[in-house]
Amino acid sequence: MKNFLFLLIVFLLNQQDSFALFSQDREIKIYKNIRCLACQGQSLNDSNSDFANDLKKVIKEKLNNNETDQEIYTYLTARYGDWILFDPPVKKSTLLLWFFPVFILVIGIFILYKRTVFEKSKLS
Amino acid sequence: MNSKIKFAGIFFLFISFFIVFYYALKSDTKNNTQIMVGTRLPNIQLSSLFNPIQKISLPSSEKENFYLINIWSSWCVPCRDEHPFLVKLKNEHQIKIFGINYKDKTSNALDFLTKLGNPFYYVGVDSDGSKSIEIGGYGVPETYVINADGIIIFKHVGPINSTTFEKIVATIK
């Protein structure tokens, strides 16, 4: 019984650690996707400017209030526009940007497939 | 026939790339500070610089056609440069100016207003910069013109100069 309790405590402590690590990872992931608008091409994660530090505080508070990543991004883009995000959201205006590479890839695969079939039929 | 298909394919790819690059070149890749113009000012609550117990909420509930919000700080040199314009706006155009004192020492802020004059109808404190972020601010100085419905109709990032002053006057007329 004692052993079991000991194992349970160790397990729970470990869970707490991994939860802390997970939330820290999430926080850094968000910081890396946000442009510091007062700096030259830096993300929030790389910057220590006043603006970046203020924004980090606001984001941290929102994370503590259990807001989702999407809710945080919506809050920021409503105030600073899509430019604040390094990953532009999928919208009507960015459809081409997101799907054009996939489209080209599909065409490439199709051409390769056609060529292979053609070469095979030529050999046989 | 085969070469015709190949030519059409290459032509199609060329046109597609041309369209993508054309739009990429034309698209706005710069920070747009005017994104909140035309939207309602988010609700913020501010404690008074002169009496921390006294609090107000913005957008203002007072029946004003227009009012100004100015983010300032005593340590900000451009804020000193724009201060005479704020005084002029208050004295000559009788517009209410709500000041947001950004990350400042109370004694320094009070000293600043004593020396340069106080054009503000109300000065609220933003000790950690969160109030400024709530309304889409970048730092100091910054000025917003708000209409009676609480809509931001003008925003200026940076100090007010004579050109900005004229624009503000034209906006509140």
Image (cartoon, rainbow, N blue to C red):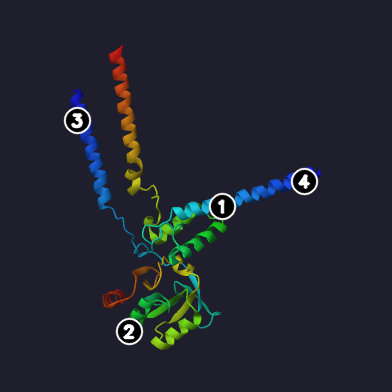
In primary-sequence order, the first of circles 3 and 2 is 3
- How far is the residue under mark 4 from the one under mark 1? 27 Å
Going 50% across and 53% down the picture, which residue do you hit? Answer: A28
| Residue type, mark 4 in image | Leu
- Give the label, 3 or 2, closer to the camera: 3
Going 35% across and 41% down the picture, which residue do you hit? Answer: A99
Image quarter in which the N terminus of chain A is found: top right
Task: Look at mark 2 in the image and give the residue it sits on.
Answer: B88
**Which chain does the numbered disc 2 sit on?**
B
- How far is the residue under mark 1 from the one under mark 2? 50 Å
| Residue type, mark 1 in image | Ser
Percent x, y of residue A95: 34, 44
Task: Look at mark 3 in the image and give the residue it sits on.
Answer: B7
In primary-sequence order, the first of circles 4 and 1 is 4
Check contact, mark 1 vs mark 3: CB within 8 A.
no
- How far is the residue under mark 3 from the one under mark 4? 74 Å
Q: Is residue A12 left or right of residue A76?
A: right
- Give the label, 1 or 2, closer to the camera: 1
